[in-house]
Image (cartoon, coloured by chain):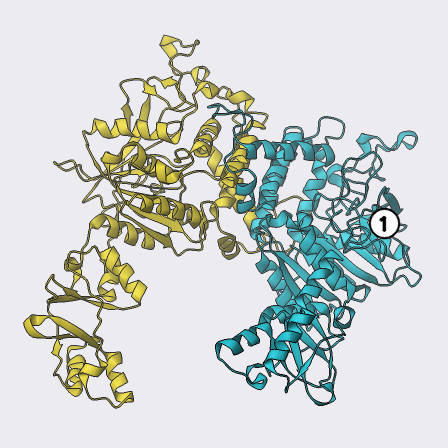
Chain colours: A cyan, B yellow
Amino acid sequence: MKKESVGIVETKYFKIAKDLKLESGKTLSDVTIAYETYGNLNKEKNNAILVCHALSGDAHAAGWHKGDEKPGWWEILIGPGKALDSEKYFIISSNVLGGCKGSTGPSSINPFSSKINKENEETNENKYGLDFPLVTIKDMVNAQKKLIDSFKIKKLLAVIGGSMGGMQVLQWMVSYPKMVKKAIPIATTAHSSPQQIAFNEVGRQAITSDYNWKDGKYYLSEPPENGLAVARMVAHITYLSNESMYEKFGRDLKDKEELSYDFTMDFQVESYLHYQGESFVKRFDANSYLYISKAIDYFDLSSNGSLIEGFKDVKSKVQIIAIESDWLYPPDQSKNILTALNANNVEVSYNELKSSYGHDAFLLEGGQLNYIVSSFLSDTVVKDLMYQSITTITKDTKIEDAAKKMLKEHVTHLPVIGEDHKLIGIVTAWDLSKSIATKCNDLNEIMTKNVKTCTSNEPIEKIASKMKKYDISCLPVIDENSKLKGIITTDQISHLLTK
Amino acid sequence: MKKESVGIVETKYFKIAKDLKLESGKTLSDVTIAYETYGNLNKEKNNAILVCHALSGDAHAAGWHKGDEKPGWWEILIGPGKALDSEKYFIISSNVLGGCKGSTGPSSINPFSSKINKENEETNENKYGLDFPLVTIKDMVNAQKKLIDSFKIKKLLAVIGGSMGGMQVLQWMVSYPKMVKKAIPIATTAHSSPQQIAFNEVGRQAITSDYNWKDGKYYLSEPPENGLAVARMVAHITYLSNESMYEKFGRDLKDKEELSYDFTMDFQVESYLHYQGESFVKRFDANSYLYISKAIDYFDLSSNGSLIEGFKDVKSKVQIIAIESDWLYPPDQSKNILTALNANNVEVSYNELKSSYGHDAFLLEGGQLNYIVSSFLSDTVVKDLMYQSITTITKDTKIEDAAKKMLKEHVTHLPVIGEDHKLIGIVTAWDLSKSIATKCNDLNEIMTKNVKTCTSNEPIEKIASKMKKYDISCLPVIDENSKLKGIITTDQISHLLTK
């Protein structure tokens, strides 16, 4: 897989024509949604993928803004040849409602501000602050829907996102079931847990306790940077696993040989956290942090206390991805989603990233993510990958000849075929060595007869799980008459990764 | 076990005569240590147990201060008939150096303050603040040592504590190996992990970012309550498990039927956290929080990077207790202590509290704690509990007669004895039913011959683990000549709990 970039990109702005009705009952006027797109929308308008960002993300998911040193936040997944392939798909990424990176939020101008001066509308004095209404994940998705409508896209090929982005994916599945062909919620939950709410509340408390916060009316003065930095620091701890912190920092000291015995920073991990806090306050609005974290807390897709009922209208094909070392959004929360979707007969699969990074793994584990996401999006089936020209033997083949054939053709599996090219068994290198150990000379005795097989139209993910389940590295492909059509190996599947 | 209290108690104050030399190289003068004692020191002065408290604890571990509604923080474990039995032991509990509950700390008067006015020494103006030197866990233990010396106690029967209290226990084992007969470190670590340091640093950052903190010179004005409350809130989340938060709060709302769609408190868990923060600031000094959390960060008993080397002089018998749902001080950290002590041939055992409470379980799981601690302290051996009058059979006993004997004596295990009362096997109710199934009539064929046994002087904890390991409920007790002396059952051991 080539790892190329979409290159230089620009953020664009979409104005929602009508007022946006919110879940709280309030309405928002003059709503702007900042967004970026990568790739081209095809004529059929059926290749669009919506990318949803997490708490501190923005519309800039891939490529470079002119002059920037760093690419967008999901560069590992988006671009030519990557899972979200900009040469195949039209990728849309937008900043959430309530955010501070171009979409309407608490730091935007309140069009109904009493202080509006038509000659100088955009003054800090006229910013919403806490007059901005509370928005929910559902409201964010409704705003995204207007953006999608503006492209005249009737159905999204996929919606994908991690953490709060995953919540938006789930909300899309529920709010607009017919508009979402495939959905990929990553490292997320269908309802925030009390622990998640508690951490968010600590962050909010740190912000609102800051002397500079002034009930959110800080746009004319110093922003509450200390409070926001503390909020980010505590959140950042929850994004890492205990293990990855050990690997990354251990108890290493920062620029000193010995403990200082004072309150300067002693440990690397402290310095890292401070850096995270300080760099965050330069790019994020404290009020947006309050609003977005509250939207996360409110998120709950249960209906009458039942997630099964909440998912009853879901039509999408779903790929759930969890992270084994994520303790903030632990795999159990993803498994709850899996169970509830299964109960609704939704076509759903579940994968866990093998990673020690913790929650942050959805931004870091490029290899595994690209593999899972591209397999799920590509609809690759067995016939796309299988070997059709294969070496076979018959049940009368002598063991010695079978061994010679294996050596000559450099294969480890020899399908045994009978009349009409029907598969009757398989002989592996392992079987042959067994024959030596037992001094058996009859192929019929050593070959495996009850062979696991697959058909050429089965999705590749299904075959991969089957091979994993039975711990086999090769499956013969047969047709409806049991005729051998080809063979597929774990090697071929793993090559998908390096395509 | 009776659950009685030590009743009304008072905090006392011990003044260290000489200057206290600190690990940093600095010295502290006029050090006071606040302490409480429960029970009486015996003539031999060998029944003293030192209790060490956690970050926010104090000397008041048990009983009631006059007029108080709540008892000391470890009332579940200390008192007549409890594991730390005040009728048997002399229990000492002291406030740590650097604390704010009577021991010398940053909120104490600095005897060298330039503003000291002899007529009015105790003014807020003369408080240490950040002029207080940094103290370590080792310094805290050195100060406790002076207190213990003042009682002319040469050797402590035990040192016990959880969390930071457990660190002090470990430090005692290392600093004064000959003074600690038994040690019980609970839910602790031999070195703070980067995650623990990170959470502490967030707390410190919240305090020092508070407008009212003023570089620690707030004793003449408003204290930094908001910052300290945020520090406590984030710490409190780490004391609970995800599971227990679900059980305790779920997504329940606080005094409302519906979400408020504003920034008032919506969820129970938020209200609980706020309560924790608000009540903490009334009883704790923000500067003490800075100093004590720093002492925790600095704690590391490794020597040249090796914990095995760090523990090389340990002489105590050790009972490690971890908590299965503790993610702040996870069981792995306790197992590291176990491994390093084992490598030094220290007599050590390890138990895990079965609890969903998380780190806080060491303050809550009274039943399990009392059982483990009292068994460890009591030195109960097999002969204290075993049945001596037992029903036996010989190898010539008919199966039918064996069955009748079982029924008559109401036992499930019949030791089979040979000449000189030597144990040659055992027959259980299960063996008898087997004989029916197999139509076997020969006792010799159905009895278990390779019987697990124990001797009368073995410690009861060891026997309990043996029975657990082999999944057996009864052990014959034999002497050095294999003569049967009695029998011990899991029933008897479990009765210890209800004594």
Quarter of the picture holding the N terminus of chain A: bottom right
Q: Is residue A309 visible?
A: no
> Extreme left residue here?
B420
Density class for disc 1 (Cα within 10 Å; few <14, some 14-19, many ≥20) is many
Numbered disc 1: secondary structure? strand
Asked if residue B193 is positioned above or below residue A4 in the image, the reply reads above
Q: Classify residue B350 as left or right of residue A96.
A: left
Quadrant containing the C terminus of chain A in the rendered view? bottom right
Considering only vertical position in the picture, is B151 above or below A243?
A: above
Among the 4 quarters of the image, the one containing residue B430: bottom left
How many marks overall?
1
Residue beneath the point at 42% across and 34% down: B299
Using the image, name the chain to which the residue with label 1 belongs. Answer: A
Drawn side of residue A27 relative to residue B430, left or right = right
* Residue A319 at x, y percent in the picture: 70, 63
Question: A436 or A33: which is nearer to us?
Answer: A436
**Which one is nearer the viewer's eye here, B345 or A31?**
B345
The x and y percentages for residue A282 are 72, 32
The spot of residue A141 in percent (x, y) is 77, 54
Q: Tell me which amino acid carries mark 1.
A: Thr
Looking at the rendering, which quadrant does residue A82 occupy? bottom right
B219 w.r.t. B301: above or below: above
Q: Residue at x 11, y 62 (%)?
A: B479
* Residue A268 in view here: yes
Horizontally, is A170 left or right of B136 in the view?
right
The picture places residue A355, in percent across and down from the top left corner, at 60, 52
To which residue does mark 1 refer?
A: A37
